[in-house]
Image (spheres, grey):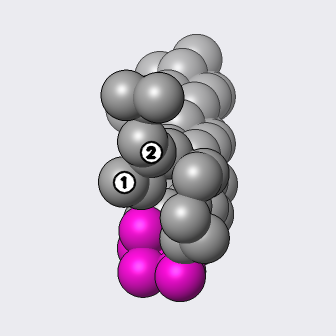
Amino acid sequence: MDSVGIASTFAITSQAQTGLALQAKFAKMSQVQDANLIAMLQEGADSLQAVSQATVEVGIGAKLDITA
């Protein structure tokens, strides 16, 4: 192999390693974003469940008498 071939191989290998490193970093960022989204959705579901289980006073949408 001549020096041009060695340099070309080194450049291609360096590019491949950089590409793999970037893909790994993007995958990790995606996992963090997914985890944050799941946590936010879970908090919203918990909040809705708390609201739906809260005691509703008469006249606030539950058993409202409008026949008078």
**Segment colored magenta:** 49-55
Q: Of the numbered discs in the image, which one, if any, rests on residue 16?
A: none
Q: Quadrant of residue 8?
A: top right
Name the residue: 47% across, 29% down.
68
Residue 22 image position (x, y, % from top left): 61, 44
In the figure, is residue 56 to the left or right of 29? left
- On the question of residue 34 being in view, the answer is no
Query: SS of the residue at dot 2?
Result: loop
Residue 56 image position (x, y, % from top left): 55, 71
* Residue bearing the label numbered 1: 63
Name the residue: 55% across, 64% down.
58
Q: Main secondary structure of the magenta part?
A: helix
Residue 31 image position (x, y, % from top left): 49, 62
Estimate how packed mark 2 is, as few (under 14), some (14 to 19) or many (20 or more) residues with alpha carbons within 10 Å: few
Closer to the camera, 62 or 16? 62
Q: Are marks 2 and 1 in contact (CB under 8 Å)?
A: yes
Closer to the camera, 45 or 51? 51
Query: SS of the residue at dot 1?
Result: loop
Residue type at numbered disc 1 = Lys
Residue 16 image position (x, y, % from top left): 47, 38
* Residue bearing the label numbered 2: 64
